[in-house]
Image: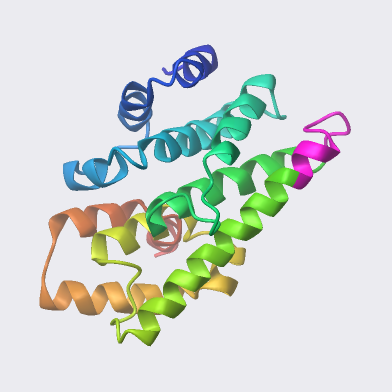
């Protein structure tokens, strides 16, 4: 099992390739094409830090010093337009910030007001960047995807279960766009990522 001290140590030493690999091997299995998409050289830091931060919130009941370190490093690499790279990476960063803010909600001595404010602003900017990405795609006549089908599937994997994302983007419309794309060009990799999406997993359990 991947321990919190190891997550922090790999992040502190900027070993993002190893950090991402170990997180994906410990409870977040993805097909190779998806792993390669997240590990692009210009976005691997945001991918690794956001997944590590999400994992840390799953392992703890309150914000820890390690989580704050990961959050600080993640916020430091946010782009001026609010994104963290392509939509899937921006979605991953947004999800990790949402998870940390939720964890902090009922803890009096949690993140502290200054860091919490910074995370809330960064979350909102990331959501705005995703909305802008969708608006740009629509204006250019895109079939409703965020990038391509794999990028959209990875975005849903990270944020598809979040009501705030549904309100900003519209999960159902993304699902329809992916279904149309897969009907034209089947992809086992995209289908595998969709199987991991929170909304699809809930639906399968309810069936």
Please give left or right for residue 69 compared with residue 193 in the image. right
Q: In the current view of this chain or complex, which residue is farthest to the right?
A: 108
User: Which quadrant: the C terminus?
Assistant: bottom left
Residue at horizontal 69 percent and vertical 29 percent from the top: 61
Please give left or right for residue 142 compared with residue 197 in the image. left
The magenta stretch spans residue 116: yes
**Which residues are drawn in magenta?**
107-117
Residue at horizontal 36 percent and vertical 78 percent from the top: 137
Residue at horizontal 52 percent and vertical 64 percent from the top: 129
Instruction: Using the image, determine if residue 197 lies above or below residue 17.
Output: below
| Quarter of the figure with residue 188 | bottom left
Please give left or right for residue 197 compared with residue 53 in the image. left
Instruction: Using the image, determine if residue 88 lies above or below residue 99.
Output: below
Residue at horizontal 12 percent and vertical 78 percent from the top: 184
Q: In the current view of this chain or complex, which residue is farthest to the left?
A: 185
Instruction: Using the image, determine if residue 136 lies above or below residue 125.
Output: below
Residue 79 image point, x, y percent:
51, 50
| Number of numbered callouts drawn | 0
Q: In the current view of this chain or complex, which residue is farthest to the front?
A: 80
| Quarter of the figure with residue 46 | top left
The magenta stretch spans residue 7: no
Residue 42 image point, x, y percent:
34, 41
Q: Quick one: 39 or 184, which is closer to the camera?
A: 39
Please give left or right for residue 125 compared with residue 41 in the image. right
Residue 148 image point, x, y percent:
25, 66
């Amino acid at each position: 099992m991947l321990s919190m001290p190891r997550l922090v140590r790999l992040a502190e030493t900027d070993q993002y390739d190893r950090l991402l690999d170990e997180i994906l091997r410990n409870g977040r299995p993805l097909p190779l094409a998806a792993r390669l998409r997240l590990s692009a050289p210009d976005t691997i830091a945001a991918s690794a830090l956001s997944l590590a931060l999400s994992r840390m919130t799953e392992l703890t009941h309150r914000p820890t010093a390690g989580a704050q370190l990961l959050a600080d490093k993640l916020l430091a690499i946010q782009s001026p337009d609010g994104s963290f790279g392509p939509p899937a990476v921006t979605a991953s960063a947004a999800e990790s910030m949402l998870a940390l803010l939720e964890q902090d909600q009922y803890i009096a001595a949690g993140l502290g007001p200054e860091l919490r404010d910074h995370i809330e602003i960064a979350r909102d900017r990331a959501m705005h960047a995703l909305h802008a990405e969708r608006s740009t795609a629509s204006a250019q006549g895109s079939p409703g995807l965020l990038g391509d089908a794999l990028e959209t599937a990875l975005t849903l994997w990270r944020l598809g279960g979040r009501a705030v994302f549904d309100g900003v983007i519209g999960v159902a419309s993304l699902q329809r766009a992916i279904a149309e794309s897969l009907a034209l060009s089947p992809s086992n990799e995209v289908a595998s990522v969709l199987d991991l999406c929170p909304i699809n997993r809930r639906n399968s359990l309810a069936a």
